[in-house]
Each structure stands twice: as structure tokens, then as C-alpha cells.
Image: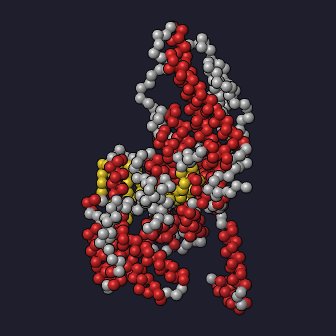
Amino acid sequence: MPSIDADTPLPSSEGITETSSSPASPVNRQRTPSVSITPPSGRTRGESHGLTSAIGNIRLSDTNGRATLSPEPRRSRNGTPRRRRSSTGAVEQHEVADEELPDDAFHSPEFQGAFRDAKQLMSNIQSVLGSSNIHEAHESTMRKLHEDAGRLAAFEYPATRTVGFVGDSGVGKSSLLNSLLDTKGLARTSNNGEACTCVVTEYHYHNRDTLDIRVNLFSIEELQDQLGRLLQVYRTFELHRDEITDAAERQDMEANAKVAKDTFQAMFRGRLTDEACLIRESYGDVLDRLTRWAADARPSPLRTYHTGLSPQACSNTLMELSSEPASRDSPATWPYIRSIKVFLNAHILSRGLILVDLPGLRDLNSARRIITERYLLECDEIFAICNIGRAATDEGVHQVFDLADRAHLSNVGIVCTRSDDIDPEESIRDWPGRRARHIEQLLEYIETTNKEIEELEADIEDYEGADLSEHERRELAECREDLRQASIRKQNYDFELKEYLITTRNRIIIDSLTNTYAGRVTDARVFCVSNTIYWQNRNARKSEAERYLHLSGILQVRKHCISIVANSQRRIATQYMKDQIPALLADIELWVQSGARTASEERREALCQTLDSVERRLRKDFASRAFCRLARGYNEDFTEYVYNNRHVSSWSRSAKNASQDWAGWHHSKLAMSQRFSTKE
């Protein structure tokens, strides 16, 4: 029995129904029948959603939307005359701004109207509560209610959301960012395994065609503080390593000392030639020397702002700032940089999204790992990037989820790159049965069409250069048209094969990852992309490029990222209207009903009337169709972000461990614990 590689997709029995009709007829000198292959119909919902447009573009011979394997009728050479193709002007290309937008209930007129009304109601309540001097009394209930109403009247939902991309060197993270930003070559890529990202790089929106870069440097005081802490950690371990007996403590101190050493080497490369000097001299003398070196090597503030850059100039500048220098004797710039912000006119950023390029968690330089770990805690959503061929066993992805678990982060997704890196022959071996037969059938159609093209090219070559009769000229024209049609068929067959291979493996990988990280990621947050397919077709004719761009998976990731801002704003605004406002109204009503002695009967009556008016308005708004849709969205969010992310097994283990711990307690200790908890 052959061995099973964890990184090799296993055959699946999911419902794929390949066609079983016989292949196209042998080559005919007049015309090879054209066929149309139906891609597998048994797709899951997540797979078919992103491929609707692509599938709609690959029908070859059926005009009513049903694909078949029936040969097209042979076209007679003496049939109806062909229409000459009209010449067009500029080639129409794909426009990112025209891509399908996610369902955006937040920006709908109904939702925005309800949100404005809610804020106006809070402003009215604030005015009513502040219409007398009652709220001026220090520490009074009315003062707190008035302040709460003012805070709600001034409520603003967050304008931006941050999405972090983290992955090991060479997995295609920078290429993915270039594709999402639709700017080729901006984030520099590396093929030699060297890290290209040594500092956090944020991509922000601005409405200009040129690009700007802003570098946020650490101050000298901040650098001195960092150097002092790193030096203390390094000296403590190096001077007292033999005194450390606890294995866990020794491991932690050694790891921290390595962070310090890596940082010193990056900052003072070419100067710090003898590491022994870090412990040979006094702490104060060493720190003073390191601080002077840092002040000399720190980039000039004049280099922190670059404007009016072209994409190529911006890319070169980013390479200088955020990567290791080409010379091993030159100090790195990145340890002096807190972060880099790049401002560009990219559609994906236009609604408030901020994309962040982060160093990998498995970077050989431990200082860079620390940068990533700290920044990930500030991201609203995180994508772990990996190569699709190693997705199931990628250690970098495991570490991202481990960090997310420790930090109680739930918004973690996965993007698998190089989805186009798949071989038909290997797939036939990996997927026996119906899938293999379907691939073989597609390969047969491609081979048949290739033979037809070769024969037509030979016929055309025989005709050309000779003195042709009228009949022969017609035959030559027929051959050229046949060649054009055969070339189109071959392109479609090639696409159908590519699409079948890619989407089939994508589904297998997505299922594998959702099982591996069950409870921590859903298939809605797992994507498979091909940056190669995207850029090969990005500037092609729109009618020809669309299906390939959809197949690349980049459009689906871009759509998901754009939805993050609106979905987050919707959740926060909904919580404001359905939780915070009713809570304030309940507090005010309780104050009124308590018969507060500080207010006159007329004032309490005015407050009651205002509350009744507000309550009627809110009930009307909450009963509208917009809020019905909002409620459904709220339930979907709860299912995705709460219910599906329950850590039942982890909770069960914790409860079991706690019960075992309690079982060892003496009954008097348990009674004392119960008595104190009752008092609390």
C-alpha cells in the first residue's frame, strides 16, 4: 500500500458528477466537432459562490445555459457567410471598482436613517436632562445620566479596521498584498528564503495617484530604554547562566537573551564585533556606548516622509527601510522604525480598511518575531498565509492559531497561495475514480484539438505563397476560420481543465483545514489564491480575463476584506442602538419611578413624556424591514463569531481539571471558600 503524504490531497467522495458521454469524434479534415464540458456540479456552497462568474463564461456551444457534451453540427464550407469581426478601439480591461461588493446593510439608507434618528434622540434626551440645574449636583444620579446621554449622542463607530497578514518567508505573502492592492511589485517579494519584511508595514488609503511613505521612528529615549532592557536581559543570562537550576526558567531566559543578541547584531552590524564587551564592561558604560551608536545609526528625521512616489520608487524605498541590507557589514534600519505607513489609491482601502504586512512568527530573527506577536494583538482580523502544498502541516499557521488562542483572538483566517501549482498527471494518481476519469477526458479533448490545430496550420502553410484560384482562396479562408475556432476551443478546454483541478483541490484543502482547526476557523475564512493567474490575466481583454480573475481567488479575498469594515461598523452600531440606548432609557425610567426628590412633579412628568416619545420612536424603527434584516444579520454574526467558535473541548477539560483539584481539598477549606464566595 503506498504511503500517504500529509501534504498531498487525499481522494474525496464528495458529490462530483462528471459527464460520462463518449469523447469527441476523431479529427475530421473539415472540422472537429466542438464540445462543451460541464464542470462538476456537486460543489459545496462555498466553492460555487466564488465561481459563478467563471462557470458562466465557459459555455462553448449551448446558448440557453445548459452545458452538454453533444457535438456541434458541422459547419458547411458553402454555408452562410461569416460576419467580419469589427475592430474595436482601446481594449476594455477589468476594473477593480466594478467588482461585486459584499452585502452592505450598514450603508443602506434605512440603516443610516435609523442610526441618525437614534443619535438625535440621544441628543434630545441630553437636552431634557440638562434643562435644569439638577445635573450639576456633584455625584448625583442625574449628573451621571446626563453624561451618559451626552456620550451616546456623540457616539461614532470606528472609521477603520486593520487586517494583518503574517506568514513565513517565501509563501507569497507580499505577492498576495500586491494582488489585493492591485499594484504589481509594490511589496517586494523574495525567492531566496531571505526575509523581505523586517518591520510592520501598513497600507492606508489616499485619493491621489502617487504614493506616500511615512516612517514612524523610535525616539532616542525610547531606543535607550529598549537597549537598557535588552542589555539587562542579555547580561543576566550570560553572567548567571550556571546559577539557573530550573529548566523552564533557564529556557525562558535563554530565549530572551537571544532576542537581545539578534537586535544588537541588527542595529550595530559592523561595529559590534566582540560580543564579550557586552558583559566585560560595566552596565552603564556599555549602555552609553550602545546609545551613542544608536544615535549615529538612527535614520535622519528628514528621511521619514517620502511623497509623490511612483509604484517602483515606493517599492525601492520600502526595500531600503524594511528589509535587511544587501551588505552584511551594514547596520539594518528596521530596528529604529516603529512602523511604516504607505498611502496609495487602492480600491480595497477606500472604505477604511488598513492592510498590514507583518514579519513571520517563525522568522530566524527572534526580534522580528516579537514585533509580529505584539502587533497581531492590535489587528481586527488576521490571515495566516501558507503554501497550498503544505497547508495541512504548515508550522507557521499552527503558531498563528496558538498565539490567537493565548490572546483570545477569534478573527483568524487562512489564505493558501499557489493554487495553480497542480499537475494533471499527479492529480490522476492522487484522485482515482470519477475525478481521474474526468481529468483524462479533458486531456483527451485538448490533445484532439491540438492535432486539429497542427493539421490546419499545415494546410494553411501549403496554401500560402502559391498562386491560388478563387476556390482555393475560399478554402484558405475556411482553414483560417477553422483554425481560429479550434484555438478558441483549446483555450476553453485548457481553462476547464485548470478550473477543475484548482477548484477540486481547493475544496479538499479547505475541508482539511476546517477539520484541523475545527472550532477556530470556518470555511468562510479559508481562501485559496493564485497570484500568478491574477497577474497573467489582469490586463487582458475583460471578456477573456474575467473567468481567470475569478479563478485566481483574489477577487473573493478582496471582497471579504472590504466587508470587514462595514460588518464591524454594523455590529457596533447595532449594539449602540439595541443595547446601549435601551440601557440608558431603563436607568432614566428607574430614576423617574423612584420618585426622585430633587425634581419637581412637572419635571418628572416632562421626562416621562419624553421617554414615552423616545420609546415609541425606537419601537417603530426596530419594527422596520431594515431592522428585520439587521436582526437576521445579527443572528448570523452570532452563529459565526460566537456559536461556531465555542471551545467546548477546552471548557470541558478546564472544568474537569478544576473538579479534580477541588476533589483534593479538605472539606473545611471547601466550606471556607463557599462562605467567602457567598459574601461576595
Is residue 543 placed above or below 599 in the rendered structure? above
Q: Residue at x 56, y 42 (%)?
A: 551
In-image side of 336 versus 504 (left or right): left
Tell me, yes or no, if residue 371 can be seen here: no
Tell me, yes or no, if residue 140 can be seen here: yes
In-image side of 427 versus 577 (left or right): right
Is residue 382 placed above or below 252 in the rendered structure? above
Q: Residue at x 36, y 68 (%)?
A: 266
Residue nearest the viewer, comparing 565 with 6? 6
Is residue 274 placed above or below 431 in the rendered structure? below
Return the x and y of residue 259 as percentages of the image width and height.
43, 73
Quarter of the figure with residue 272:
bottom left
Q: Residue at x 28, y 59 (%)?
A: 303
In-image side of 215 versus 540 (left or right): left
Residue nearest the viewer, comparing 647 with 569? 647
Q: Residue at x 44, y 75 (%)?
A: 258
Which residue lies most toward the top here? 470
Residue nearest the viewer, comparing 364 with 568? 364
Quarter of the figure with residue 454:
top right
Q: Say which quadrant the N terminus sits in.
A: bottom right
Return the x and y of residue 305 as percentages of the image width and height.
30, 57
In-image side of 78 versus 273 (left or right): right
Residue nearest the viewer, comparing 165 with 490? 490
Return the x and y of residue 176 as percentages of the image width and height.
48, 50
User: How many tags in the picture?
Assistant: 0
Return the x and y of residue 337 as percentages of the image width and height.
35, 64
